[in-house]
Image (cartoon, helix red, strand yellow):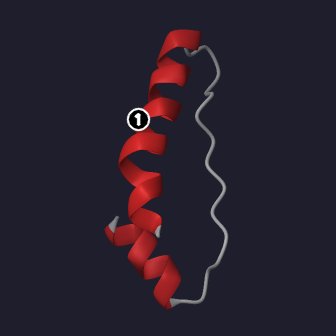
Amino acid sequence: MAKVKQLREHGVQYLACYFDFAGMERMKVLKATELFSKEVVPRLG
């Protein structure tokens, strides 16, 4: 969240996230996406 705060301070308004890295198992990608949506997105306001 500190990095996101820094980006906001520099005027960044949009953030694109990529969770599917080459060779990653589908379940790990889904888990990372779910975790981000539950833990990070609500804190973005």
Residue 24 image offset from top left, x and y in percent? 56, 16
Query: Dot 1, crowdedness within 10 Å: few (<14), some or many (≥20)?
Result: few
The residue lying toward the viewer, choosing from 17 and 42, is: 42
Q: Is residue 3 above or below residue 12?
A: above
Rendering quarter of residue 43 = bottom left
Q: Amino acid at mark 1?
A: Leu
Q: Residue at x 48, y 43 (%)?
A: 37
Rendering quarter of residue 6 = bottom left
Rendering quarter of residue 12 = bottom right
Q: Is residue 42 above or below residue 9?
A: above
Judge left or right: residue 20 versus residue 42.
right
Judge left or right: residue 3 versus residue 17.
left
Q: Residue at x 40, y 69 (%)?
A: 3
Residue 7 image offset from top left, x and y in percent? 50, 78
Q: Secondary structure at mark 1?
A: helix
Q: Is residue 10 visible?
A: yes
Q: Quadrant of the N terminus?
A: bottom left
Q: Is residue 34 above or below residue 45?
A: above
Q: Is residue 25 visible?
A: no
Q: Which residue is mark 1?
A: 35
Judge left or right: residue 7 versus residue 22.
left
The residue lying toward the viewer, choosing from 45 and 12, is: 45
Q: Count the marks: how many?
A: 1
The residue lying toward the viewer, choosing from 37 and 16, is: 37
Q: Residue at x 36, y 46 (%)?
A: 39
Residue 28 image offset from top left, x and y in percent? 47, 17
The residue lying toward the viewer, choosing from 5 and 40, is: 40
